[in-house]
Image (cartoon, rainbow, N blue to C red):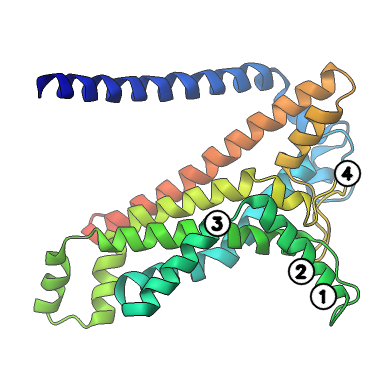
Amino acid sequence: MRRRLIFFRFLAYFGALFVAVASGALYFFIISRGLPVLGGRLFFGDTPPLAAILGLRPVWDGIWPAFAGTFCLVLLTMLLAALPGIGCGIYLARFAEGRVRERLSFAVDLLAGVPSIVMGLFGFVLILLLRHTIAPQATTSISLAAFCLALLVMPALVVTTRSSLESLPPMLELTGASLGFSENQILRRLLLPAAARGILGGVILSMGRAAEDTAVIMLTGVVVNSGLPAGLAAKFEALPFLIYYTAAQYADESELLRGFGASLVLLLLSAFLTGGAWLCQRGMERRWKGIR
């Protein structure tokens, strides 16, 4: 028995050390290569920053259009995925029963196992179908990419919402019922705020997946040097595809360093989104606990 305890303790310490060292080495490599080029020139090149931000002048040798495209893509993806994903998780945790629960859970598991390249092919085939039926002018765009990414990240929202609600102590619901709360009031005022940490964890995972995925957007509308997104039906640039394209097609060291700079910016963007979700989570918890 003691040997098993020592073995599992060693395994736990080894796993923690391995994750810390691997992630630290990755962060150090990206920061050491990308930090020297991080600055206004990396984003805007020779274009005046204000003119680039307002879209008055194009940016040819900076990553600003890709940064703006990634931000818009993540925002649009979450607008499409958050409500149905969280709603489906609530339905599975609180209302679904019997075969409906089993079949819907199985459908979510199947959707979670779909590779991103298959989801990209689905979006591409969907456009071909629309062209031959009701929309002859349909083409790949940022809205199609966001729709496919929303389908890709939705299972994470469903699973985390369901798990967070199901893991709450039963006494919480009994306490609400004893106070005369209706079922909707128990869900809205007690269960959802208590499960906010897990739900926002799923939101963070979904935003990270949407920001870094390359396979889906390659087939659904991303291009190089398209400029700022001009609308929901327009082509767009994105940081993951810019990094991939730079790594495959760079002509000199300056272009390669710009790719490392784009990698660092993508990492910082993910950290910014995570920090924003953490602040929302903290605010909801403080409000639920009555702390001002």
Q: Position of residue 193 (x, y in %)?
A: 30, 62
Mark 1: amino acid: Leu
In three-dimensional space, the C-alpha distance between marks 1 and 4, rounded to whole angstroms, equals: 26 Å
The residue to which callout 1 is attached is 130
Say if 55 sits above or below 193 in the image: above
Q: Which residue is drawn at 82% across and 61% down?
A: 140
Q: Do the residues labelled 3 and 2 touch (CB within 8 Å)?
A: no
* First-in-chain label (1 vs 3): 1
Q: Residue at x 78, y 61 (%)?
A: 124
Q: Are marks 1 and 3 in contact (CB under 8 Å)?
A: no
The residue to which callout 2 is attached is 126
Quadrant position of residue 94? bottom left
Say if 88 sits above or below 284 in the image: below
Q: Are marks 1 and 2 in contact (CB under 8 Å)?
A: yes
- Quarter of the rendering occupied by the C terminus: bottom left
Rendered image: mark on residue 153: 3
Report helix, strand or loop for mark 3: helix
Rendered image: mark on residue 225: 4
